[in-house]
Image: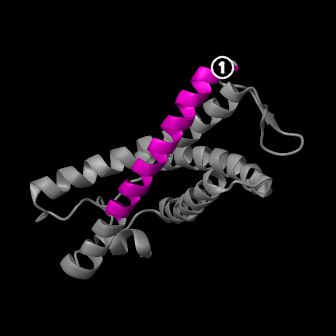
Amino acid sequence: MKATPDHFAPIARLIHWAMAVLIIAMLFIGVGMVTSVSDRHEWLIHLHKPLGIAILVLVTLRLVVRFTHKHPPLPADLPAIQALAARLSHVALYALMLAMPLVGWAMVSASGEPVMLSESLRLPSLIAANPVAFAWLRSAHTWLALLLFATILLHLAAALYHGLIRRDGVLQSMAKGE
């Protein structure tokens, strides 16, 4: 095995793309929930909660994989400011992918509603019912979602820049295997 791989490990690529699909779906589901004035969006809420917990589990697994598997380095000729931006944006993505489901879970806890993943699977409350905390957490969840969306757009723009303009292998290291 090479000391520095050209591609991310297959498990890292699988988790990355599964999370990409789930997170984009969650952003659209979240927008659908908050823009609906009807009670017909209740099914979106019942979908949103377990998907959020799935994302929390996957990002935890993704962090384990990130720290236990070698990953390709950034190109040696990448300007220092771009390398710093890449590192900081990845830290921001991981932080937001952890924070969003935890804040959502705490928000539902603060609402006083049970945190149900299914008809029979109930998660413990993270905090006691508190309307002030609920309002604050709901606002935080919204702002974090907007920040996550913006960070994903920057991540996508950077991936396209590497794949279409620089053609330096960065996009291919996550897009396809050996």
* Front-most of residues 23 and 144: 144
- In the image, taking residue 122 as reference, residue 170 lies left or right, namely left
Q: Is residue 150 covered in magenta?
A: yes
Looking at the picture, how far across and down is residue 22, in whole percent? 59, 60
The secondary element bearing badge 1 is classed as: loop
- In the image, taking residue 91 as reference, residue 65 lies left or right, namely right
Q: Check disc 1: other Cα within 10 Å, few if <14, some if 14-19, many if 20+.
A: few
Main SS of the magenta segment?
A: helix
Q: Is residue 91 covered in magenta?
A: no
- In the image, taking residue 83 as reference, residue 130 lies left or right, namely right
Image position of 96 with respect to 167: above or below:
above
Looking at the picture, how far across and down is residue 166, in whole percent? 19, 76
Magenta span of residues? 129-155
Looking at the picture, how far across and down is residue 148, in whole percent? 43, 51
Image position of 66 with respect to 13: above or below:
above
Image position of 13 with respect to 114: above or below:
below
